[in-house]
Amino acid sequence: MKIFSAPQVREADAYTIQHEPVSSLDLMERAASRCSAWIEEHFSPKHPVYIICGKGNNGGDGLAIVRQLLLHGYDATAYTIQGATSPDHTANLLRLRESYPDKVHPLNDLQEFPSLPPDALIVDALFGTGLNKPIEGWMGGVIHHMNNLRQKHTIIAIDMPSGLRADSTSLHTPVVQAHHTLSFETWKLAFLMPENAAFVGQVHILPIGLHPDYLTHTPARFHLTDLETIRTIYQPRDPFGHKGTYGHALLIAGSYGKMGAALLSARSCLRAGVGLLTCHVPACGYEIMQLGEPAAMCITDSEIQHSTHFHLDIADASYTTVGIGPGLGTHQQTALALEKLLENFRSPMVLDADALNIISVYPYLLYRIPQGSIITPHPKEFERLFGKTANDFERLELLSSKSQELGIYILLKGRYSAMACPDGAVYFNPTGNPGMATGGSGDVLTGILTALLAQRYTPKAAIILGVWLHGFAGDLAAASLSQEGMTAGDITTHLGAAFLQGI
Ligand SMILES: NC(=O)C1=CN([C@@H]2O[C@H](COP(=O)(O)OP(=O)(O)OC[C@H]3O[C@@H](n4cnc5c(N)ncnc54)[C@H](OP(=O)(O)O)[C@@H]3O)[C@@H](O)[C@H]2O)[C@H](O)CC1
Ligand SMILES: [K+]
């Protein structure tokens, strides 16, 4: 699903008005009716609804919602900021005043903010995508006041929480902290940024019938992975396939005290469909690996506690891909071995965890990663590799520019993991839950991505599908075991069900 910028959303709006065709007032009525229907579905008429309306079309939506709710037996009231209003706002104001004159009140300063009965809902229709400067003065006070009421009253934002910018940071400016955001037609980039989590609450995308030609043909840089995308990527197995068809992966992982990471990664690699798996582990890991995962072959390093020379095993060139990093440790000999590996193996591979920690100490190695490889840092690892940024939007730009500069796929892990591609596109993943924020989750993901590369998915397909499956399996694990009770290994045990139900 494409994520459009605020100017693109305005274009989509204008395109729809011209080509459907539909009047802008009717489009507003349609948008408002989706919101009032949502409110009616989730809250009974015993909740009085207070709608705070700005001067533009977001406020116009709010006025139309008030009228629609009143018609359906709700007690709704509009509070409107005074000033020059947009034409569709004005039209809706007149319509509301005509039928329900006592349901519209001016809001000129904070003193005029209504005192709310206990069950009241607050609907925020102050500003939407038209916000064009920071909010100052008493209107900032209105936002602050609404936020103070959020413990007692549910706040529902129309299209955007007011004050939130769709495409750039809103840090250090007043923004409504909504419980629910009812947003029209498409996700906005701001909703996916961790720094905005406190503002957007739960996001509900309400289709309002924007013109499909615009949505289909307009290119977008940012995307949210959806089932449709996943179904185009997934390749069912060939009925005549054999284990060679699905690739031979080499997983380089584990060190003394961290063999669990290697085992977690190996198991998920096998459960994600790899044809053959060989694990390179230090000598102390031989029995752990052989007993822990009989389907994996195992070769051992000459060193007991950490790995020192995996380049020899690479030389026979039988490996389709390599996954390296889980539990590897950062011993200097391991760093030298990683450098050799990057010299000898030039096909796309997966680098995670300690492989990335080593690279952050020897940054020149970044430039030796084979083109098309996937690296999977969490935010701290990302910062160690590429430096600090002032906000999440800057970090996203840095992520994308590094991916393009280095020619590698960079996955920044988080609630909506961001996958930057060398062609400039960035995909966000919606699956997963906080139960996955536990040791070993990343090792499981490395195994999945390695398996998909081995099966000759393109790196772009592998990263989008792999991250989706990882999150989906995590969601299934949480559904049966709870977010608290699940462990990283449970993600792996639910991978099979994720292939069956998540594609
Ligand atoms: N997406 C769609 O297809 C549809 C969207 N709809 C709704 O329309 C809004 C966007 O409406 P718009 O009128 O463009 O903008 P806003 O309502 O968000 O606000 C614009 C007004 O606010 C003033 N403004 C902007 N920033 C500030 C500020 N920081 N402080 C004070 N005032 C501000 C601006 O006035 P200026 O003259 O000062 O620039 C505007 O008056 C969208 O979000 C949806 O809710 C349609 O209803 C349906 C189709
Ligand atoms: K709003």
Image (cartoon, rainbow, N blue to C red):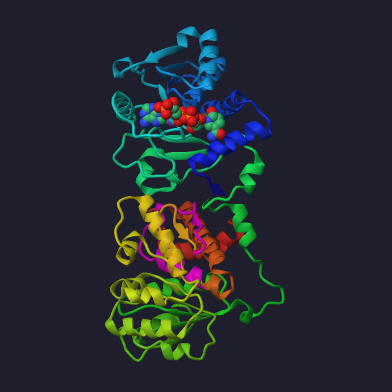
Comparing 454 with 438, the one in front is 454
Q: Position of residue 7 (x, y in %)?
A: 50, 40
- Give the residue drawn at x 32%, y 81%: 335
Q: Position of residue 176 (x, y in %)?
A: 36, 33
Q: Position of residue 36 (x, y in %)?
A: 54, 25
Q: Position of residue 478 (x, y in %)?
A: 45, 54
Quadrant housing the C terminus: bottom right
Q: Is residue 292 visible?
A: yes
Q: Is residue 259 visible?
A: no
- Give the residue drawn at x 53%, y 73%: 270
Is 204 located above or below residue 394 in the figure?
A: above
- Give the residue drawn at x 55%, y 9%: 99
Whether residue 432 appears in magenta in the rendering, the answer is yes
Residue 204 lies left or right of residue 438; in this view the side is right
Whether residue 464 appears in magenta in the rendering, the answer is no
Is 163 located above or below residue 60 in the figure?
A: below
Residue lying at the far right of the rendered structure: 240
- Magenta range: 422-450
Is 151 located above or below residue 270 in the figure?
A: above
Q: Which picture quadrant has residue 241?
A: bottom right
Q: Which picture quadrant has residue 37?
A: top right
